[in-house]
Image (cartoon, grey):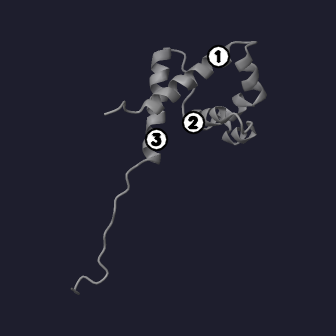
Amino acid sequence: MGLPNVDVKFKSLLYNRILTMGARDGSMTSELLRFCYVPEALTNPAYALRTPSKLVYLRRYLTDMTCVAPYAAGETRKQFKRRICNVLLRLAMIVNAPSELRIVRKFPDTN
């Protein structure tokens, strides 16, 4: 049967981890995020293209996290992770939405 939405859950945990590690001053992750213009990219998605192409996970982080509202003051980490997961799930459903097949007969009176 498989696990449903594992990729979405993994992404939400990864994005939360990037946010947590990027918030620590002086860490390697925070310096990398500052170097790649991440704070500017979260408010202006055009900055995501400035991210080096070899850092694909960071580019995906920037494009996906522009859809998520910032961390609220009264919100717990668990609620924030759940909110990230819900947004990513909605994005995945939009991309992979089943399309309806419309069948039209051009000449209905012919056999």
Is residue 75 shown above or below 2? above
| Extreme residue in the front direction | 1
Task: Tell me residue 3's x, y (percent).
Answer: 37, 30
Q: Amino acid at mark 2?
A: Asp
Q: Which mark is residue 64?
A: 2
Residue that appears at 58% across and 19% down: 17
Indicate left or right for 67 with 97 as reference. Answer: right
Q: Secondary structure at mark 3?
A: helix
Which residue type does callout 1 highlight? Met
Q: Secondary structure at mark 1?
A: helix
Number of residues whose C-alpha sits closer than 10 Å to that of mark 1, classed few (under 14), some (14–19) or many (20 or more): some
Residue at which label 1 appears: 21
From mark 2 to mark 3, how far is it between C-alphas? 11 Å
Q: Earlier in the sequence, mark 1 or mark 3?
A: 1
Could you tell me which residue is drawn at 74 percent across and 17 percent down?
A: 28
Could you tell me residue 56's position as x and y percent?
A: 65, 36
Residue receiving disc 3: 92
Query: Which of marks 1 and 2 precedes in the sequence?
Result: 1
52 or 25: nearer the viewer: 52
* Dot 2: element: helix
